[in-house]
């Protein structure tokens, strides 16, 4: 009769199985160590299990790779914004997150200038691209909160109704565009540690959400969270989708004064997305995946040498970053820094990042 296989018969497995018991039979310190190790193992194992469930449940959904595009930033790099966007569409970009800075479109109270957003929508429609339109006060890029000068010194009771009037004008103007896919409401609204923002009132966010949803109930609304901020989005509003920002390699100006690589594996963000789907039945998109250098000591990109830029992002890291985004399991990933790739190509005469982007987006055509 064949001997039945038992995993516990192997000496190594047997000894590992007895390890917690050995620690438990020793001093109280060993008991604490055993409890901590076991608790961490159970916690990490549970997180990993949720992540794998989420990744497997989403793997058959179509994958969308997009970019954020900000004309003001392109211009600050010495680029021609329409030309930059044209070339992004030429390499196969078909999803773009656009901004509607209040400071750009309403420099004088009640007088709107939509010329900049108009040409972006026109180009997106011509390219049959999908647009995620960011609305509200806080939108991507420094100083994060983009209030016009005339509103910046006013109390919230004065500027909030004026902001909502502007948001109403934005939504009304673009809600019928064939390229509009969704709205992103504000950007990392509750992140207090970054940006020149002073108002984090949840009731304002709820009011803005209700405004946009009532004006255009047919398009989803996304609310974004920061990648490493503690907390979980259980309060109101509960949007159609959540997004998350992921930055992997940044300059630590506070403690080490070195580049810091966040250690979170890709599955960690799959875990966050999975828990969210279990708890509030909302999906998550990766709305901002770092694909741009992070200069040291508060410098701008043009003030930073190419060799220094490569310390936080070169072509190899760029490829790895895209693979990392895919490995989270999230099926919509927008890359952060598309204007920067074109800057490296045309101003610094370094095509390395542009070539990586071209290969990735060509594969998605």
Image (cartoon, rainbow, N blue to C red):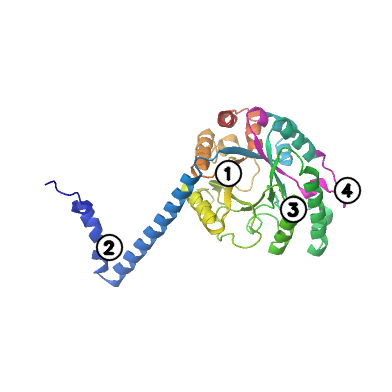
Secondary element under disc 1, as helix, strand or loop, is strand
Residue at left offset 55%, top offset 42%: 331
Q: Name the residue under label 1.
A: 289
Secondary element under disc 4, as helix, strand or loop, is loop
Q: Name the residue under label 2.
A: 20
| Vertical order, 233 against 291 (above or below) | below
Of badges 3 and 4, the one in the foreground is 3
Q: Do the residues labelled 2 and 1 touch (CB within 8 Å)?
A: no
Secondary element under disc 3, as helix, strand or loop, is helix
Give the image location of residue 12, x and y in percent: 21, 52
Res 175 visible: yes
Give the image location of residue 34, x and y in percent: 31, 64
Start-end of magenta stretch: 88-115
Of badges 2 and 3, the one in the foreground is 3
Which numbered disc flags the more N-terminal residue, 1 or 4?
Answer: 4
- Label 1 vs label 4: CA separation? 35 Å
Q: Mark 4 points at which residue?
A: 111
Give the image location of residue 318, x and y in percent: 54, 36
Counting every numbered tag in the picture gives 4
Nearer to the camera, 25 or 248 = 25
- Label 2 vs label 3: CA separation? 56 Å
Q: Name the residue under label 3.
A: 212
User: Which quarter shows the C terminus?
Assistant: top right
The quarter holding residue 191 reads bottom right
Which numbered disc flags the more N-terminal residue, 2 or 4?
Answer: 2
């Amino acid at each position: 009769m064949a001997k039945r296989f038992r995993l516990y018969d192997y000496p190594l497995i047997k000894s590992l199985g007895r390890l917690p018991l050995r620690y438990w039979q020793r001093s109280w310190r060993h008991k604490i160590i055993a409890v901590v190790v076991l608790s961490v193992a159970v916690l990490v194992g549970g997180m990993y299990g949720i992540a794998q469930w989420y990744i497997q449940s989403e793997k058959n959904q179509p994958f969308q790779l997009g970019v954020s595009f900000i004309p003001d930033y392109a211009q600050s790099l010495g680029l021609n914004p329409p030309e930059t966007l044209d070339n992004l569409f030429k390499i196969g970009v078909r999803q773009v997150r656009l901004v509607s800075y209040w400071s750009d479109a309403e420099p004088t109270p009640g007088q709107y200038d939509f010329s900049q957003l108009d040409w972006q929508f026109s180009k997106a429609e011509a390219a049959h691209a999908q647009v995620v339109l960011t609305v509200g006060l806080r939108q991507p890029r420094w100083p994060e909160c983009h209030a016009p000068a005339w509103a910046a010194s006013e109390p919230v009771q004065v500027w909030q109704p004026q902001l909502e009037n502007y948001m109403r004008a934005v939504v009304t103007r673009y809600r019928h565009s064939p390229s509009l896919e969704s709205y992103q409401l504000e950007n990392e609204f509750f992140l207090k540690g970054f940006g020149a923002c002073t108002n984090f009132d949840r009731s304002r966010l709820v009011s803005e959400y209700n405004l946009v949803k009532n004006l255009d109930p047919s398009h989803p609304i996304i609310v974004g969270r920061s990648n490493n901020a503690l907390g979980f989005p259980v309060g109101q509003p509960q949007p159609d989708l959540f997004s998350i920002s992921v930055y992997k390699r940044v300059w630590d100006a506070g403690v080490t004064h070195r580049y810091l690589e966040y250690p979170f594996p890709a599955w960690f963000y799959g875990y966050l997305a999975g828990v969210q789907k279990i708890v509030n039945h909302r999906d998550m998109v990766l709305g901002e995946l770092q694909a741009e250098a992070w200069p040291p000591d508060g410098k701008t990109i043009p003030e930073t040498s190419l060799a220094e830029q490569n310390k936080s992002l070169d072509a190899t890291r760029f490829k790895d970053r895209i693979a990392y985004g895919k490995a989270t399991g999230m099926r919509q990933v927008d890359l952060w820094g598309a204007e920067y790739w074109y800057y490296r190509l045309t101003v610094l005469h370094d095509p390395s990042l542009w070539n990586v982007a071209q290969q990735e987006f060509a594969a998605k055509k």
